[in-house]
Image (cartoon, grey):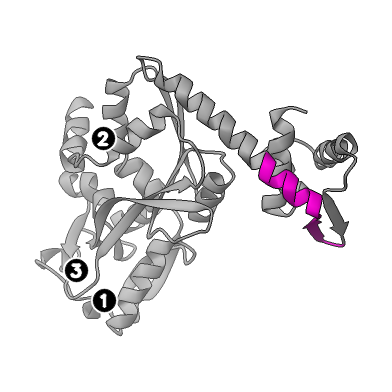
Amino acid sequence: MDLLNFKIFCDVVETRSFTKAAARNYLSQSAVSQQVRSIEEELNETLINRGRGTLELTEAGEIFLVGSRSILQSFEEIKARLAATKREVSGAIRISSTYSIGLYELPPYLQRFIQLYPNVQMSVDYRHTPDIYEDVISKRVDLGFVAYPSPRPQLTIHPFREDRLTLVCHPDHPFSKLSSIDPRQLHEQPFVAFSRVTPTSKAIRRILKRAHAQVRIVMEFDNIELIKRAVEINGGVSIVPWHTILPQVQNGVLAAVPLRNANDLRPLGVLLRKERILPTAVLRFLDLLEEPLDIANHMKASKSAGR
């Protein structure tokens, strides 16, 4: 019996599905079923009662689950201790992030970390928010970055930063001349919205609802880049995170107007899987995230370097 057997069993129990456990481990459902069956045969015990659409652990299954988790945890601790003995920080960090955070909030941290630890491989997947939670829970990635983080039993949430929501419009729009705007002034305005399922969209709708502002949604996207393009062609106004439009505001293709009388702070958080020993590289990156790097200056420097 190898470590994969223990992991597969834990995944089956956690997801309550042979199919989902198979997807986590890039195996077929039949292969996962066979591995669990092999464990039961080796132990001469029934670990899971398989009913119609249900999976229930037997008493032996409960004991085996506790032992499996302990074995996997011990192995993670061994790897972490071995990594700590090395002078050089190496390995890989896998990140799952929303587009807005990954493209506009993370880059200065990634750049700084790579400068400090060139032997660490960084990878960032841009995903929708529900997928990010699943990625971290399933241990497909080490860290997840989301806006308006919400608790999950399997996760720990570390505060990252706070961004501000701001009105964005075409430079020729009458709103562009204002020093600030009350959300009530958006009543009946053509509006380019985030997809309803995103946490940022829900926060924006709360702002509009409190202001009794009924906007006319003309377009709806789940990608910040598409929203910006729609506003650039004067397709409507929108409310977006400030840092996502900073380059376009600096270039004069978009205008930003601060919101007034609105809860415009947008909290960002880092998701981590509970009860997991984190590799040294991940711990170093979490330490770096606590530093107040200047995103605006990073964007200006990147813009200058690209000329």
Do we see residue 213 in this rendering?
A: no
Q: Say which label, 3 or 2, has the lower sequence index.
A: 2
Which residue shows up at 34% across the image and 18% down it? 118
Q: Where residue 112 is drawn, which disc sits there?
A: none
Q: Amino acid at mark 2?
A: Pro
Task: Estimate how packed mark 1 is, as few (under 14), some (14 to 19) or many (20 or more) residues with alpha carbons within 10 Å.
Answer: many
Q: Position of residue 190 (x, y in %)?
A: 34, 72
Q: Position of residue 228 (x, y in %)?
A: 33, 53
Q: Which residue is mark 3?
A: 259
* Residue in the foreground of this view, choosing between 68 and 230: 68
Which residue shows up at 32% across the image and 65% down it? 236
**Residue located farthest toward the bottom when viewing the structure as drawn:** 212
Q: Is residue 106 left or right of residue 49?
A: left
Compared to residue 67, the image places residue 14 above or below, namely: below
Q: Position of residue 127 (x, y in %)?
A: 49, 46
Q: Which residue is mark 2?
A: 108
Range of residues picked out in magenta? 52-67
- Residue 67, quarter of picture: top right
Q: Amino acid at mark 1?
A: Leu
Q: Tell me the element at label 1.
A: helix
Which residue shows up at 17% across the image and 31% down it? 301
Asked whether 292 falls inside the magenta stretch, the response is no
Q: Nearer the viewer, mark 3 or mark 2?
A: 2
Q: Which residue is mark 1?
A: 186
- Residue 8, quarter of picture: top right
Q: Position of residue 141 (x, y in %)?
A: 51, 38
State the separation of the CA atoms marked 2 and 1. Answer: 34 Å
Q: Nearer the viewer, mark 2 or mark 1?
A: 2
Task: Estimate how packed mark 2 is, as few (under 14), some (14 to 19) or many (20 or more) residues with alpha carbons within 10 Å.
Answer: some
